[in-house]
Image: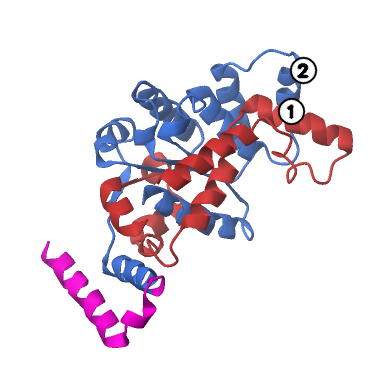
Chain colours: A red, B blue
Amino acid sequence: MAQTTSTHRVTVGDGNTNSGNIKDSFNTTVYNSGEDAKIMRWLSPLEPENRHHAVCADRLEGVGNWLLETSEFREWRGGEGGADEAVLFCSGDPGVGKTYLR
Amino acid sequence: MAGNTSSLAIDSLCDQAREEDIVVAWVYCDYNAQQEQTVINIMGALLRRLVGREIPEDIREAFEEGRRPLLADLMRMLKIAISSLPRVFIFIDALDECLPKDLAEILGLLRDVVRESPQTRMFLTGRPHVNEPVQKYFTNAVAIPISPNRDDIRNYLEMKLDRDDEPEAMNMDLRAEIVTTILEKMSNM
C-alpha cells in the first residue's frame, strides 16, 4: 500500500506538468494541444490514468479474476435495465486484502 | 485489494470499449491525496475522461471566461457529456478513503447522474463501513463482498515461493506442502 500511495503523490504532482493530455490531443495542432491540455487541467488536476497504471503494475496475475465471472458483475456490465441495477458496490476489508494479496 | 478489484474491472471494460461504443471513467480515492481529491476535482476528473477528444464548445467557453469552474458548472457539463454517449461506466475506488465530510456529497452527486442519465453504470468500492451510506443513496445497489478466495491465496503463495530468497532450500515436495498446509489452515478459520 505504501508503494501505491507514494506513486499516487507523484501522480498528483504530474497534474501540474504538461505531460497530461498527450493522448487526447494527439491528432490536433500544436496550439490546440496546449490549449486542450490547459482545459483538461482546468477541469481537474487529478490524473486517474496514472494511478490506474500504478495499480495495474502492482496487480498479481489471476488474483480477483473471479469477480469478473460473477453473475452480478456480468449483469451490471451488460444490463439494459434502468437505474435499478446501475450500481455495483464491492466491499472488502483492506486488512484482509493487503495482508494476503499485496 | 479494492484497488486490485477496480483495476481489473476497469481493464475489462476498457477492453470492451475497443469494440463497443462505451466510455469508462474512474477515480481512485487515496488517504494521502485528500487535499487534492476535493469533490470538485473528483467530478472534474470524471468529466475529463468523458469529454473525449473533441472538447465541447460550452466547456471551452467556460474555460475562456478565466474563472475556476464551480461544482454546479462541472455537474452540468458532466451530464451534457454523458447525454451524448450511449453507455458510460464510472468507477470510484476506495470511497472510504475520501474525506468523511465529502462522502455523502459525492454519493448524492453520483445518484443525480444515474437518475438523470440511465445509460450510466457505477462501480463503487470501499471498506464494509461505507456500505450503509452507499445503500442509503443507492437503495438498489448490488453489493458484492470481496475477500480472497482459495485460488487467490494459492496464486499469492506461488508468487511468494517463486521469489524465495533461498531456492536451494526448497524442493517441489516442500513447496506443495507449504501451499496445502496454508490453504487448509485458511479454510479452518
Range shown magenta? B162-189
Residue corresponding to mark 1: A38
The three-letter amino acid code for the residue at tag 2 is: Glu
Q: Residue at x 37, y 27 (%)?
A: B103
Residue corresponding to mark 2: B64
- Looking at the picture, tell me which residue is in the foreground, A65 or B164: B164
Q: Is residue B83 visible?
A: no
Q: Is residue B114 visible?
A: yes
Q: Are marks 1 and 2 on the same chain?
A: no
Q: Is residue A37 left or right of residue B166?
A: right
Q: Secondary structure at mark 2?
A: helix
Q: Chain of mark 2?
A: B
How many discs appear? 2
Nearer the camera: disc 1 or disc 2: 1
Mark 1 and mark 2: span between their CA atoms? 11 Å
Q: Residue at x 88, y 37 (%)?
A: A30
Q: Residue at x 75, y 24 (%)?
A: B60
Q: Quadrant of residue A22?
A: top right
Q: Are marks 1 and 2 in contact (CB under 8 Å)?
A: no
The three-letter amino acid code for the residue at tag 1 is: Lys
Q: Residue B155 location in percent, x, y?
A: 35, 70
Q: Does the magenta stretch mainly form a helix, a strand or a loop?
A: helix
Label 2 neighbour load within 10 Å: few <14, some 14-19, many 20+: few
- Looking at the picture, tell me which residue is in the foreground, A32 or A72: A32
Q: Residue B123 location in percent, x, y?
A: 42, 45
Q: Residue at x 58, y 29 (%)?
A: B44
